[in-house]
Image (cartoon, rainbow, N blue to C red):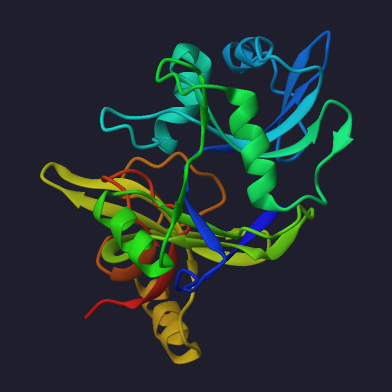
């Protein structure tokens, strides 16, 4: 079940809100003889998530299917997406699974049960909170969605996921779940472009005290007139090699003369995520 992205968190009764943990969506499948962990695309990551699987194997249950998010946290307790891949490879003891839904329990399919009832069973299954456990219950917050989102933004979180308490579990995109992300608009220096499939993306750099540093890519979200200005300008500033270190193949490179306004997820100076190029900065 996938939440739809919305501009404003739902308001009104009947909704509960959770922190949107920034990690890898994961299903834990608990059976009497083994526990396996699956990615959202169906790959078996049990070996990489062995600490999580071992902890799930200690739960007092015959069988269960638990939906959640696999994360690694920074010093503030905030999920750190950029540090996740490295932690999986080198620091698996840092991995934490935030469980937020229960799909099956001891052979019973719970997907037709209300969300609040499923979560009640999940809390009971996980037992008393233990801050040292690699499996944590994702707490829900009642209240006005916009207020909860504003609090999450002040804390530097990625956003929130809002869910109808009465909703049933349905695979795929669902209006009963909504995600609201904390975004910001910044200016970056254009250094290149390439095609992602048939979609053009801009390659961007961030200005630092020591010079330009590659910051990632952004999809074009400009008006047609602005795109034409960008195209003609890029023809004039083409160069053979990148102006900053960026190990990318199949790209066109430009002199770092043009600044681009970019909407992206908030981050502490890391690589751009979910970025859209809005236009040329004045």
Asked if 178 appears above or below 111 in the picture, the reply is below
Q: Is residue 157 above or below residue 257?
A: above
**54 or 148, which is in the foreground?**
148
Taking the spot 51% from the left edge, 38% from the top edge, the residue there is 138
Where does the image place residue 190, in percent across and percent down from the top left? 34, 62
In the rendered image, residue 204, in percent from the top left (x then y), is placed at: 36, 57
Q: Nearer the viewer, residue 222 or 183?
A: 183
In the image, is 26 to the left or to the right of 222?
right
Relative side of 218 to 135, left or right: left
User: Is there any visible trace of residue 238 in the rendered image?
Assistant: no
Q: Residue 171's spot in the image, x, y percent? A: 79, 53
Which residue: 42% across, 81% down?
232
Q: Quadrant of residue 103?
A: top right
| Point 13% across, 41% down: residue | 210
Quarter of the view holding residue 4? bottom right
Question: Residue 2: image x %, image y %?
Answer: 67, 55
The residue depicted at 63 percent of the width and 39 percent of the height is 120
Q: Is residue 53 above or below residue 200?
A: above
Q: Quadrant of the C terminus?
A: bottom left
Q: In screen coordinates, is 94 left or right of 41?
A: left
Q: Total number of numbered labels?
A: 0
Q: Is residue 64 visible?
A: yes
Going by the image, does 12 lie left or right of 173?
Answer: left
């Amino acid at each position: 079940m996938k939440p739809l992205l919305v501009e404003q968190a739902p308001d009104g009764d009947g909704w509960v809100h959770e922190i949107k943990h920034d990690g890898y969506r994961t299903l834990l499948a608990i059976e009497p003889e083994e526990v396996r962990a699956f990615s959202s695309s169906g790959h078996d990551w049990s070996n990489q998530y062995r600490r999580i699987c071992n902890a799930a194997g200690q739960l007092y249950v015959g069988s269960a299917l638990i939906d959640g998010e696999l994360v690694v946290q920074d010093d503030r307790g905030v999920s750190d997406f950029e540090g996740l891949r490295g932690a999986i490879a080198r620091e698996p003891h840092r991995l934490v699974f935030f469980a937020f839904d229960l799909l099956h329990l001891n052979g019973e399919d719970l997907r037709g049960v209300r969300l609040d009832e499923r979560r009640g069973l999940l809390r009971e299954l996980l037992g008393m909170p233990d801050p040292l456990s690699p499996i944590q219950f994702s707490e829900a917050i009642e209240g006005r969605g916009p207020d909860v989102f504003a609090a999450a933004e002040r804390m530097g979180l990625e956003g929130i996921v809002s869910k109808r308490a009465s909703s049933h579990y349905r695979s795929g995109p669902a209006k009963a779940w909504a995600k609201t992300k904390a975004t910001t608009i910044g200016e970056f220096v254009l250094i290149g472009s390439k095609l992602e499939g048939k979609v053009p993306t801009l390659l961007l750099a961030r200005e630092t005290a020591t010079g330009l540093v590659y910051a990632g890519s952004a999809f074009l979200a400009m008006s047609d007139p602005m795109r034409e200005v960008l195209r003609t300008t890029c023809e004039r500033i083409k160069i053979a090699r990148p102006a900053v270190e960026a190990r990318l193949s199949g790209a066109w490179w430009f002199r770092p003369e043009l600044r681009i306004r970019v909407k992206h997820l908030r981050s502490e100076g890391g690589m751009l995520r979910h970025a859209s190029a809005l236009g040329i900065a004045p």
